[in-house]
Amino acid sequence: MNLPSAAPSTVPRPSKGRPRGFDRSEALERALDVFWRLGYEPATIAELCTAMGINPPSLYAAFGNKAKLFLEAVDFYDRKYWDAARVALEEEADVYPGIESFFADAAAILLSPRAPCGCLVVLAAINVSPESTEVYEAVRSMRRAGKTFFAQRLQRGVEDGQLPASTDIAVLAATLKAMLEGMSIQARDGIGQAELAGVAAHVIKLLPPRSTQHP
Amino acid sequence: MNLPSAAPSTVPRPSKGRPRGFDRSEALERALDVFWRLGYEPATIAELCTAMGINPPSLYAAFGNKAKLFLEAVDFYDRKYWDAARVALEEEADVYPGIESFFADAAAILLSPRAPCGCLVVLAAINVSPESTEVYEAVRSMRRAGKTFFAQRLQRGVEDGQLPASTDIAVLAATLKAMLEGMSIQARDGIGQAELAGVAAHVIKLLPPRSTQHP
DNA sequence: TCAGTTCTATAGTGGTTGCTATACATAGCG
DNA sequence: CGCTATGTATAGCAACCACTATAGAACTGA
């Protein structure tokens, strides 16, 4: 749980002046919970401060502003909840069981009992006012990165001779990403764990039949 | 384009006092555009009024409040953009081509050039503040109705001997709905028309192999 | 013409938002 | 102890929100 700080500072304690009276990482996780539950704009500074156990000036001194706090929380969420599943998909040599277990993992992550469910990247900043465009763009680029991640893994599957060379990688990656994002909405809308796992199990059918060619 | 009014009033003109100075249906469509573009909460009364060409008192006299205006706009959207696709799926006797062309229709609807894309029911009120709970519940129940619609059509497919009797209808309906909702997010994020059509074409693979039994 | 009724426009209401000015507290360093 | 630097707490800023009170305008029916 000893994660590297996102701040560009080198050491944890330059130490001069009054030291900070709260744990920055812990406060960030509390903020994450609020954003997860409410979304970016509905989460107010007052509610964030209450959950973080601090006052507005401390929040602004430590995180800059609401948008930066949110982006840092999203980044933290993405790494904490999704890194393991991504690594597993990278390390699994066969793309078929790789995708299969990635979506099984996703079903479990999306119904994590910590929050009211669904992926923060997908749900927290879908409909925001025009003055929060930068936040919207940021989460959208994270979603695009997810699609690219699928595409790269599928490409490797083709190169390894598992997927047929005729596979339309861009479309298939978009299909998988759409499925993952739709599962977020199902999770938010209160689907049961067994049912979501069943949905995830359907995903493997979207892949083309295994290639009979060798690489 | 002569749609029945959602209001419980019987005739178009009870006529007494000063007549309304704007077309109610036209104003509703203008409001729909704003909600579609911005979402429920980011859309302000001022912006809605500008688009509708009226002032706040007229808006409140004609539609009640912001929440009622939104729900009426969503209802209008759902009927205008989705009724035809639903009817086609009902009337197609074979569930396989029925689902296939429903999703092809959906891909076209979701990239309708009218708005910045995606389904209003899915995207406009995903992350709202706690005081808009009734609006969130309303769109969520519309989403659930969409899932139920899929389930009923699949059930008929089983009864007609097209789908195998072993089909898990609840899970398959949830899978199709997740796909449809994920396509909304892809549309919002700027996917191309051909690519989204390709995604839609993948959906048919989610159905089990056609049953060989007769009804 | 003159009520009676309904819609419209101006101008605001109280409440909430993200954010901060000011004053004070707590640290290292001489 | 000062002196400087940084964090914290209170209180409040201007801007914006959904919504409405008031007054006047436009119609019907007599």
Image: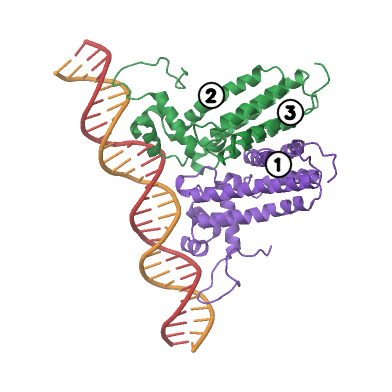
Chain colours: A green, B purple, C red, D orange
Q: Which chain carries label 3?
A: A
- Disc 2 from disc 1: Cα separation: 35 Å
Q: Are marks 3 and 1 on the same chain?
A: no
**Which residue bears the numbered disc 2?**
A79
Q: Which SS class for mark 1? A: helix
Q: Are marks 2 and 1 on the same chain?
A: no
Mark 3 is surrounded, within 10 Å at the Cα level, by few (under 14), some (14 to 19) or many (20 or more) other residues, namely some
Q: Nearer the viewer, residue A129 or A110?
A: A110
Q: Nearer the viewer, residue B194 or B100?
A: B100
Amino acid type, callout 2: Arg
Question: In the image, residue A158 lies at what x, y percent?
Answer: 76, 21
Q: Which SS class for mark 3? A: helix
Location of the N terminus of chain B by quadrant is bottom right
Q: In this view, does B174 lie to the left or right of D17?
A: right
Numbered disc in front, either 3 or 2? 2
Q: In this view, does A37 lie to the left or right of B199?
A: left
Q: Are marks 3 and 2 on the same chain?
A: yes
The dot on residue B169 is: 1
Question: In the image, residue B116 lies at what x, y percent?
Answer: 62, 45
